[in-house]
Amino acid sequence: DQQVKQNSPSLSVQEGRISILNCDYTNSMFDYFLWYKKYPAEGPTFLISISSIKDKNVDGRFTVFLNKSAKHLSLHIVPSQPGDSAVYFCAASAGGSSNTGKLIFGQGTTLQVKP
Amino acid sequence: ETGVTQSPTHLIKTRGQQVTLRCSSQSGHNTVSWYQQALGQGPQFIFQYYREEENGRGNFPPRFSGLQFPNYSSELNVNALELDDSALYLCASSRAGTLNTGELFFGEGSRLTVL
């Protein structure tokens, strides 16, 4: 069973506009959520994270929103830039921020930002 | 500060053979996790090593085994290779027990093709 789902395989946005990537999860034990970005031929790189005790976390152009009742989180990128074009993975952990070696990943969403 | 390095980057094996993949963790990191990423999917947790012992395992059969060495580097061994083992194998390191963003640092991966 897929505990973390990213239902949109791809997303295309215009440079300067907002990109919104969505993620749903089913396991109520998840208490820490992360977003990773992956370019071709590179390993995933960490973008931003959020604890289940919060509903929003901001880091520059990136904001993650968490709706625990809906078991849904989203990543907002504003403004989007062509360099943001990559595959974005949502991931979840049941061990807090100090135990994220065992992450459950979604399938990924490919973001294309057009100049 | 050196990042996570993996070797080899690409390799081709035939069914029934055995393979060993290697990973050097980032300086100061004492925990190594291995993930399998099939084409078009998100990374899937194989196992984690901490203090040279397996510390959690995903849904993978016993023919997937690993080691962690005193210098925190690690190996992933896969016996009796099957066609479905063809994937990108990612190693990630972290420092256990610290309050942080929870991010894992990934290597670029080893692309295994089983013919």
Image: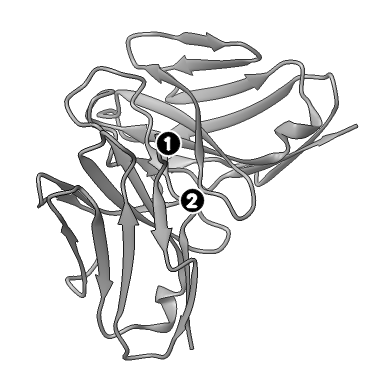
Q: Please name the residue that numbered disc 1 is placed on.
A: A91
In the rendering, at what x and y percent does residue B60 appear?
A: 25, 64
Give, as a three-letter code, the residue at label 2: Gly
Q: Quadrant of residue A98?
A: top left
Horizontal relation, residue A61 to residue A52: left or right: right
| A75 up-or-down from B62: above or below | above
Q: Which mark is residue B42?
A: 2
Chain ID of residue with mark 2: B
Q: Which mark is residue B74?
A: none
Can the viewer see residue B59 in this picture? no
In the rendering, at what x and y percent does residue B5 appear?
A: 41, 52
- Residue drawn 33% across and 26% down? B102
Give, as a three-letter code, the residue at label 1: Ala
Chain ID of residue with mark 1: A
- The quadrant of the rendering that contains the N terminus of chain B is top left
- Residue drawn 63% across and 30% down? A21
Horizontal relation, residue B58 to residue A43: left or right: left
Q: Quadrant of residue B34?
A: bottom left
Query: Is the residue marked by circle 2 packed among few (<14), some (14-19), or many (20+) residues within 10 Å?
Result: many
In the rendering, at what x and y percent does residue B41 appear?
A: 52, 56
Cβ–Cβ under 8 Å for marks 1 and 2: yes
Q: Marks 1 and 2: same chain? A: no
Can the viewer see residue A114 in this picture? yes
Q: Residue lying farthest front?
A: B1
Residue placed most toward the observer, B78 or A93: B78
